[in-house]
Image (cartoon, coloured by chain):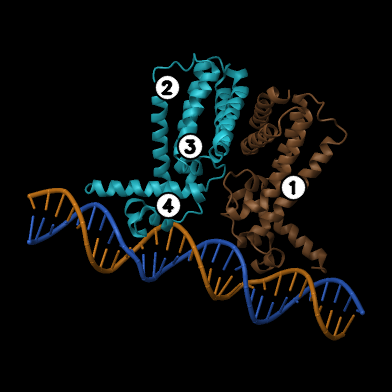
Chain colours: A cyan, B brown, C blue, D orange
DNA sequence: GACAAATACGAGCGGACGCTCGTATTCTGC
DNA sequence: GCAGAATACGAGCGTCCGCTCGTATTTGTC
């Protein structure tokens, strides 16, 4: 637990990268731990020197994604008054970086975009979901202070769900079609949110 | 292939019911064929008297769902001029029965709502997807005849995706919350489609 | 250089899963 | 009522998967 942080940390890095890649290609359940180890260039035994089990890998990956998303939010929104921005620009400022993130981290959707995760994984990704819901809820509350809490909660849930649903389409498409679908995502969000927080 | 249609057909019925229930509870991959057989009250060997393999069960289930959906469409829309209906009513006339269908057939979403099906299943559910896309495409074309085909196609894809994303939320909720989420689904569709085919 | 901790290996264990197969039973046609 | 087809059974085969464990190597500390 204490020493060899250089080699060890590097291995952890390799393993998480390999796992993300494998999850993106085949999904969580269809990816074997031996495949992850092979992709990371290590033996099955070595993998379990750093992770207790397969779920633990997903959990660590989800934590990493959550941290990256938090950074992304901080970087994109620092100084801007989100509650005052026109809805168009607010949506663009959020979906743009989000699409980039999903393109750069294609393993993300394997953990986040599935409606029916295996029970063992729900615990691993629950913090990620909770963090996102909290952020969107805060944003909506700031823009529409008079809204009842349960409506805010429901609206945030639906908005997140819409993004979750559209993202695989966007990521899977290429070139012009991807840009068009990004526009559709913005249109969907605008059409849904305008009457509530417009 | 010819005889014993009474017992045999009854078994097929039992198996499909059991499979739908099991898929709804645990998802496709986590459901074992022996579990399906046990739920159907038969032995593993008997199951394979009627289905070639696990995928074949999913395929048959998807076909059955497709047929039921086709019936549902016919029953709900007979005689009505969909292209002339106000958008609100059109959306309500579609989402209402669709929610009922999903409530009555909870195994449906395990085959339809997942973004990342195992490769062996994509072929099994492809006809279902194609049928739905064709129907929505036709509907949109009828309502907005001037629209370019690629826009119609993309709009239909997105609309289906929105319903797919919201349905698990609606089915999982109960009572008032379900009704509220149904309203949100209609609001989402209306906000998205109004500028295009309003 | 000695020693212990951390890292690395990979054959293989235990168990689950999809599916088979030999055999027994039930139904249908004649 | 008999022959054969359809249905039924369930132990178990082959395979893959998550994971272990005995052992070997590398690294930090003194």
Residue C18, placed above or below residue A126? below
> Can you give x and y, in whole percent of width and height, for residue B53 in the image?
65, 63
Q: Is residue B62 left or right of residue D5?
A: left
Q: Residue at x 55, y 42 (%)?
A: A114
Whether labels 3 and 2 belong to a single chain: the reply is: yes
Q: Nearer the viewer, residue B38 or A121?
A: A121
**Dividing the picture into quarters, in which one does residue A168 lie?**
top right
Residue contact at pointers 4 and 1, CB within 8 angstroms: no
Q: Say which residue label 3 marks.
A: A102
Q: Residue at x 59, y 35 (%)?
A: A177
Q: Label 3 vs label 2: CA separation?
A: 18 Å
Q: Which chain does tag 2 point to?
A: A
Residue B157, placed above or below residue A81? below
Look at the image and tell me whether residue A56 can be seen.
Answer: no
Residue B102, placed above or below residue A95? below
Element under label 1? Answer: helix
Q: Say which residue label 4 marks.
A: A54
Q: Label 1 vs label 2: CA separation?
A: 46 Å
Q: Residue at x 53, y 38 (%)?
A: A171
Q: Which chain does tag 3 point to?
A: A
Q: Label 3 vs label 1: CA separation?
A: 32 Å
Look at the image and tell me whether residue B117 can be seen.
Answer: yes
Q: Say which residue label 2 marks.
A: A77
Element under label 2? Answer: helix
Element under label 3? Answer: helix
Q: Residues within 10 Å of mark 2 (few under 14, many from 20)?
A: few
Q: Residue at x 78, y 61 (%)?
A: B9
| Image depth: mark 2 or mark 4 in front | 2
| Image depth: mark 4 or mark 3 in front | 3
| Image depth: mark 4 or mark 1 in front | 1
């Amino acid at each position: 637990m204490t020493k060899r942080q250089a080699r060890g940390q590097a291995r952890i890095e390799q393993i998480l990268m390999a796992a993300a890649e494998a999850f993106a290609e085949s999904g969580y359940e269809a990816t074997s731990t031996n495949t992850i180890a092979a992709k990371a260039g290590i033996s099955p035994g070595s993998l379990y020197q750093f992770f207790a089990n397969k779920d633990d890998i997903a959990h660590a990956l989800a934590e990493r994604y959550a941290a990256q998303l938090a950074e992304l939010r901080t970087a994109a929104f620092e100084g801007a008054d989100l509650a005052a921005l026109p809805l168009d620009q607010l949506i663009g400022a959020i979906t743009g970086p989000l699409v980039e993130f999903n393109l750069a981290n294609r393993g993300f959707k394997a953990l986040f975009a599935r409606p029916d995760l295996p029970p063992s994984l729900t615990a691993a990704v629950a913090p990620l979901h909770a963090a996102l819901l909290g952020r969107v809820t805060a944003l909506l509350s700031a823009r529409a202070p008079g809204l009842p809490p349960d409506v805010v909660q429901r609206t945030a849930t639906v908005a997140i769900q819409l993004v979750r649903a559209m993202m695989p389409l966007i990521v899977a498409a290429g070139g012009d079609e991807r840009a068009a679908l990004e526009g559709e995502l913005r249109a969907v969000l605008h059409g849904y949110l305008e009457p509530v927080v417009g």
